[in-house]
DNA sequence: GCCAACGTTGGC
DNA sequence: GCCAACGTTGGC
């Protein structure tokens, strides 16, 4: 079992939204970054743990836990010409972009903010979230880092 | 293949 | 709103 951190902007889709979804599950569409896609395609498995991270907001941080609920499959929004994430260069017979389903597990008892994670940088060496300039929306989390982060809750 | 220009991300 | 960091695009 692997662990991940997945970012979302709470103004568009936050952990509260995931909880309200049918089956509390949502296709994680709109990923248009090859490295993030490759994580989904090559390494994610149903049952993997997810730290649900709120980005681009007043208090960025981890707000809840989720799990991967499917293997990777083609992101339908890439073929919808009216959709914001439409990709004219992607063909249905050879989809460029994939997604996975993500299922809600629970809110954290309290958010673990980015600022707090930075304070524990010495325990989280190699965790890309706290590296300067990181922009990836899907990050692997080492089991040891997962354990240390969970211990902060 | 290089690299400047551009667009996006995301913290602050 | 600002801006640093980064990925992508496209001219050459």
Image (tube, coloured by chain):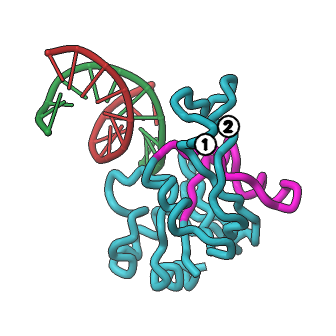
Chain colours: A cyan, B green, C red
**Crowd around label 1: few <14 · some 14–19 · many ≥20 (10 Å):** some
Residue B11 x %, y %: 44, 51
Q: Position of residue A49 (x, y in %)?
A: 62, 74
In depth, the one of A75 and A149 nearer the eye is A75
Quadrant location, the C terminus of chain A: bottom right
Residue range corresponding to the magenta coloring: A5-33
Q: Based on the displayed image, in which of its 4 quarters is residue B6 positioned?
A: top left
Please provide percent x and percent y for residue A116.
47, 69
Give the residue at the far right of this rendering.
A22
Residue at (55, 34) in percent of width and height: A90
Residue, disc 2: A77
Residue A72 vertical placement versus C9 (above, below)? below
Is residue A70 placed above or below B11 in the rendered structure? below
Provide the residue designation for mark 1: A30
Asked whether disc 1 touches disc 2, contact meaning CB atoms under 8 Å apart, the reply is: yes
Q: Nearer the viewer, residue A19 or A118?
A: A19
Residue A139: in magenta span: no
Residue A20 percent location from the top left of the image: 85, 55
With respect to residue A111, does A143 lie above or below? below
Q: Is residue A15 magenta?
A: yes
Asked which quadrant contains residue A79, the reply is top right
> Along the horizontal axis of the image, is A97 left or right of A17?
left
Q: Earlier in the sequence, mark 1 or mark 2?
A: 1
Q: Quadrant of the N terminus of chain A?
A: bottom right
Residue at point 87%, 61% (across, down): A23
Q: Nearer the viewer, mark 1 or mark 2?
A: 2
């Amino acid at each position: 079992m692997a662990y991940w951190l997945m970012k979302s902007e709470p103004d568009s889709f936050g952990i509260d939204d995931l909880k309200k979804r049918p089956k509390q599950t949502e296709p994680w569409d709109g990923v248009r970054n090859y490295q993030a896609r490759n994580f989904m395609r090559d390494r994610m498995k149903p049952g993997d743990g997810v730290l649900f991270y709120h980005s681009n907001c007043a208090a960025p941080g981890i707000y809840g836990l989720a799990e991967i609920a499917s293997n990777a499959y083609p992101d339908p929004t890439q073929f919808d010409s009216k959709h914001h994430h439409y990709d004219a260069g992607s063909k249905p017979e050879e989809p460029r972009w994939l997604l996975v389903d993500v299922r809600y597990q629970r809110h954290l008892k309290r958010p673990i903010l980015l600022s707090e994670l930075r304070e524990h940088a010495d325990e989280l060496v190699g965790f890309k979230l706290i590296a300067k300039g990181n922009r990836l929306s899907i990050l692997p989390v080492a089991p040891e880092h997962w354990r240390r982060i969970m211990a902060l809750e």
